[in-house]
Image (tube, grey):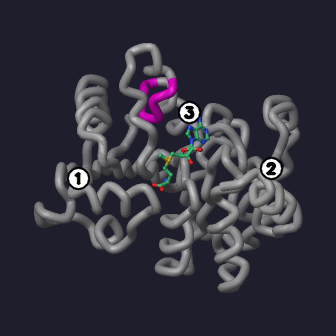
Amino acid sequence: MGSKNKLKRFNENETFANVFQPSRDELVTNQFHLKGQWNKIFFKNENPLVLELGCGKGEYSVALAKKYPNRNFIGVDIKGARFWRGAKTALEENLPNVGFLRTQIELIDHAFANKEVDEIWITFPDPQIKYKRTKHRMTNSEFLERYKTILKPEGVVNLKTDSEFMHGYTLGLLHGAGHEVLYANHNVYKQEGSPEEVTSIQTFYESQYLEQNKPITYIRFKIK
Ligand SMILES: C[S@@+](CC[C@H](N)C(=O)[O-])C[C@H]1O[C@@H](n2cnc3c(N)ncnc32)[C@H](O)[C@@H]1O
């Protein structure tokens, strides 16, 4: 995407009522007004709150919002020019139950209060295969601790990835730490039993992997 186009999207994001872009300072000093109040202030209902982390263009957030009008969705990504797509679609289609948050996932527990969230989707995260990149892997134990803080006790996490490495790494870590794997599938379009929302929605990255005939994997788990 050209820099002119990016700038246009950044400017438009500023005007979108469904986009939130708190500064790092605002978050770490606990001054972000929506923390603990997403449902009360933004969604104006008490429906379950679902996050999509590393949402890219926000395909899951938007598709799930259409499918489940009685649940609230927030796509989270550091790249505003990407989720501009999802935010614009949500506005054009008058979807009141989806919003977008521009922040680093490392700060997620500053953007949501303890036990504010019911469910998390992690869709096609960068696998960060190199050992030195372990700390950036979105299912490492530090990230799981952050997710645990913001999730309700019965809250679940969904991981959908094309990366066999990420799938295996996450399963190993979950088993090793005694977390509860509710469901795992290493080839969701070939092996029967995947939940409908796993096979009926494709993200931007996923479509490219499917063209290359890469198996898509899925894990649903609870953090103990
Ligand atoms: C491989 S893309 C997948 C995007 C989308 N889920 C999809 O499947 O098309 C990974 C996304 O995660 C975002 N991301 C990676 N690390 C992040 C971090 N630490 N905080 C926020 N976003 C992050 C990137 O900006 C990118 O949009």
Question: At x 69% / y 68%, what residue is drawn?
Answer: 87
Q: Secondary structure at mark 3?
A: helix
Residue type marked 1: Lys
Q: Secondary structure at mark 1?
A: loop
Looking at the rendered image, the disc whose residue lies closer to the viewer, 3 or 2, is 2
Total tally of numbered discs in the picture:
3
Q: Is residue 182 left or right of residue 74?
A: left
**Residue 209 picture quarter:** bottom left
Report, in whole angstroms, how far the alpha carbon at label 3 lies from the one at label 2. 20 Å
Looking at the rendered image, the disc whose residue lies closer to the viewer, 1 or 3, is 1
Q: Quadrant of the C terminus?
A: top left
Mark found first going from the N terminus, 1 or 2: 2
Checking the image for residue 21, the label placed there is 2
Task: Find out whether the residues at labels 3 and 2 contact each other: C-beta distance under 8 Å.
Answer: no
Residue 155, visible in the rendered structure: no
Q: Is residue 39 left or right of residue 14?
A: left
Query: Regarding ligand 1, which quadrant of the image does it lie in?
Result: top right
Image: magenta residue range? 136-141
Q: Which residue is mark 1?
A: 214
Question: At x 81% / y 34%, what residue is drawn?
Answer: 24
Checking the image for residue 146, the label placed there is 3
Residue 219 x %, y %: 29, 48
